[in-house]
Image (spheres, rainbow, N blue to C red):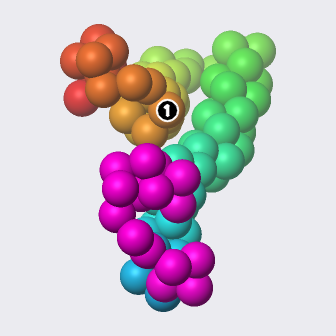
Amino acid sequence: MHARVKEAGVAVPLDDERLLKEVVMFADRCDISEELTRLGSHLVQFRDQLRSAEPVGRTLDFLSQEMNRELNTIARKRTPPRYRRWSCS
């Protein structure tokens, strides 16, 4: 972030608190670890439901929706803007 600001010709000291806050906020917005954890959990549950002898249609539908949400969130956070329109927001 500091390099980008410097390339833009803007003089910002390294101890600029606003810049540090922006970097932290940017890093937080880009972090997909929670989404990956939830997606993994949903996949395990989905697989377990497929092995069940009981009716599981509603549960699979719910898990599919949840996996779709996680994948779309990951796509919005990690995909270059020109490709984001491909996600199912």
Q: Position of residue 73 (x, y in %)?
A: 42, 38
For image coordinates 75% across by 29% down, the residue present is 44
Q: Per the image, is 7 magenta?
A: yes
Image position of 63 with respect to 17: above or below? above
Of residues 87 and 9, which is closer to you in this image? Answer: 9
Q: Residues within 10 Å of mark 1 (few under 14, many from 20)?
A: some
Residue 80 visible in the shown view: yes
Left or right: residue 81 compared with residue 49: left
Q: Position of residue 12 (x, y in %)?
A: 43, 74
Image position of 24 with respect to 46: above or below? below
For image coordinates 52% across by 60% down, the residue present is 2
Q: Position of residue 74 (x, y in %)?
A: 49, 34
For image coordinates 39% across by 24% down, the residue present is 80
Q: Label 1 sits on what residue type? A: Arg
Q: Per the image, is 21 magenta?
A: no
Of residues 30 and 54, which is closer to you in this image? Answer: 30
- Mark 1 element type: helix
* Numbered-mark total: 1
Residue 66 visible in the shown view: no
Where is residue 89, by image quadrant?
Answer: top left
Of residues 82 and 42, which is closer to you in this image? Answer: 82
- Which residue carries the number 1 mark? 78
Image position of 38 with respect to 86: above or below? below
Q: Position of residue 63 (x, y in %)?
A: 51, 30
Q: Which residues are magenta?
A: 1-16
